[in-house]
Image: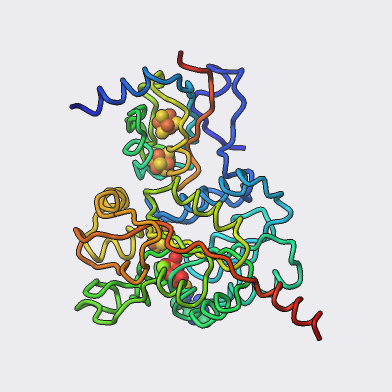
């Protein structure tokens, strides 16, 4: 191992923690990862591995599924069962995984473009059916991997490679979409709320049914640069100022404006119970 | 009131963990998140470069570390983490 640990061994031989806590769940031979300096994806991965650890879910019972994109690279780093699927198809793949192995804890980890542009239809139907899985969307308001095109969450007026004069389309409000389609747990946080994200992930993973966590995340290379947001750290500081926590508020009021001063509503919007797809199917088939 | 004084008070009032910090310099991409968001101002940017050309953080006030783990969770590159070394009475 080519670690360049700073103080280990020579100074504090009695201490043992020579690994970052996330690496227990990751394929270390693939690290360091490819993501840019200040990209929010790595922090989201740590929040997730911390949640697995806190809930003591055995590594063999976890399946992580991603589509395509920078966010889609995440699955490839997990040393759980993990699947880097085709663009937009993380949820169909996760559905098959869950139905064939109902004991598996299935997490979909993917981007705004993957889950809501090409994969949008799968999202609404998985929510409608209340499939027992957790979907984590790292929303960086653009297609980061392919060079910063606008997508279904790009705020109005924002600049992207494909909207040089500003985006005039109306974006999705993801918590509202998830709640309307039938998700039983819906939360939104920003990358600076790393602990809250971990807590939301713990809640989502423990929840039976379709749970959704949106993470508003810096993409300094794509969206950030084109919209004069500065470095990743400037984006995180701006989230600190803009975020207003409104638990159990109406998600339809949680629209995101491009204006760098405008308030962004975060919090846990939905936490309800209704029978899952597998429960409904079992009941129905037994009654026949 | 200075936040410095508030923090001093907070750590005086309750017994806190005493933390120890590890930095894996070759993974660091110099985003500065750990330095900016450490609640105890334990870290500073180092003068040296790593092999990628970034300045990794260095703990310049390790005595103030309370093992809260925020640097480890906010670091996007799995490059910094903490361990409990003892308790501050
Ligand atoms: C079928 C297909 N169409 C288009 C692409 C090109 N493509 C790769 S990633 C991507 C968008 C990813 O956006 P998002 O999910 O937001 O991920 P990010 O990179 O922003 O994390 C697209 C359109 C592809 N790989 N496959
Ligand atoms: S392009 Fe954006 S999303 Fe992709 S790794 Fe870089 S910062 Fe992250
Ligand atoms: S563990 Fe907490 S107090 Fe210690 S360096 Fe990290 S962020 Fe600062
Ligand atoms: S948060 Fe991680 S990558 Fe960023 S400066 Fe600190 S150690 Fe380096
Ligand atoms: Mg994206």
Determine the residue located farthest toward the bottom in the rendered image. Answer: A288
Residue A101 at x, y percent in the picture: 76, 67
Residue A93 at x, y percent in the picture: 64, 74
Residue A145 in view (yes/no): no
Residue A125 at x, y percent in the picture: 56, 81
Please count the marks in the image: 0
Tell me the residue at 57%/44% (across/down): A22
Q: Is residue A223 above or below residue B55?
A: below
Tell me the residue at 34%/72% (across/down): A252
Q: Nearer the viewer, residue A262 or B31?
A: A262
User: Relative to residue A288, is residue A117 drawn left or right?
Assistant: left
Q: Nearer the viewer, residue A82 or A123?
A: A123
User: Relative to residue A9, is residue B65 drawn left or right?
Assistant: left
Q: Is residue B6 above or below residue B71?
A: above
Quarter of image, res A282: bottom right
Q: Quadrant of ligand 4?
A: top left
Tell me the residue at 71%/49% (across/down): A58
Residue A19 in view (yes/no): yes
Residue A197 at x, y percent in the picture: 46, 51
Q: Quadrant of the C terminus of chain A?
A: bottom right
Q: How is the image coloured?
A: rainbow
Q: Is residue A120 above or below residue A232?
A: below
Determine the residue located farthest toward the front in the rendered image. Answer: A287
Q: Quadrant of the N terminus of chain A?
A: top right
């Amino acid at each position: 191992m080519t670690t360049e640990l700073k103080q280990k061994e020579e100074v504090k031989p009695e201490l043992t923690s020579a690994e970052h806590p996330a690496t227990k769940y990751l394929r270390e031979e693939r690290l360091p990862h490819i993501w840019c300096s200040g990209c929010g994806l790595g922090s989201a991965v740590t929040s997730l591995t911390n949640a697995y650890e806190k809930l003591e879910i055995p590594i063999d019972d976890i399946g992580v599924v991603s589509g395509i994109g920078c966010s889609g690279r995440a699955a490839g780093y997990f040393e759980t069962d993990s699947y880097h699927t085709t663009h937009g198809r993380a949820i169909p793949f996760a559905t098959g995984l869950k139905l064939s192995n109902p004991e598996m804890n299935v997490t979909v980890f993917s981007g705004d473009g993957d889950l809501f542009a090409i994969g949008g239809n799968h999202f609404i139907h998985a929510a409608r059916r209340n499939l027992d899985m957790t979907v984590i969307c790292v929303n960086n308001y653009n297609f980061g991997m392919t060079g910063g095109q606008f997508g279904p969450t790009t705020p109005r007026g924002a600049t992207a490679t494909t909207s040089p004069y500003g985006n005039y389309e109306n974006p999705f409000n993801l918590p509202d979409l998830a709640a309307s389609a039938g998700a039983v747990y819906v939360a939104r946080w920003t990358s600076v709320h790393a602990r809250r994200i971990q807590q939301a992930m713990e809640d989502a993973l423990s929840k039976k049914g379709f749970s959704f966590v949106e993470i508003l995340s810096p993409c300094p290379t794509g969206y950030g640069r084109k919209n004069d947001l500065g470095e990743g750290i400037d984006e995180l500081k701006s989230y600190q100022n803009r975020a207003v926590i409104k638990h159990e508020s109406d998600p339809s009021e949680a629209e995101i404006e491009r204006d760098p001063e405008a308030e962004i509503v975060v919090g846990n919007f939905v936490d309800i119970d209704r029978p899952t797809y597998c429960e409904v199917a079992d009941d129905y088939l037994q009654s026949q | 009131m200075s936040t410095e004084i508030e923090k001093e008070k907070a750590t005086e009032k309750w017994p806190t963990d005493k933390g120890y910090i590890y930095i894996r310099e070759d993974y660091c991409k110099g985003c500065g998140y750990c330095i900016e968001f450490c609640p105890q101002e334990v870290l500073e940017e180092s003068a040296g470069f790593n092999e990628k050309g970034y300045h990794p953080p260095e703990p310049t006030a390790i005595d103030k570390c309370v093992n809260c783990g925020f640097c480890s969770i906010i670091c996007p590159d799995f490059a910094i983490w903490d361990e409990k070394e003892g308790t501050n009475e």
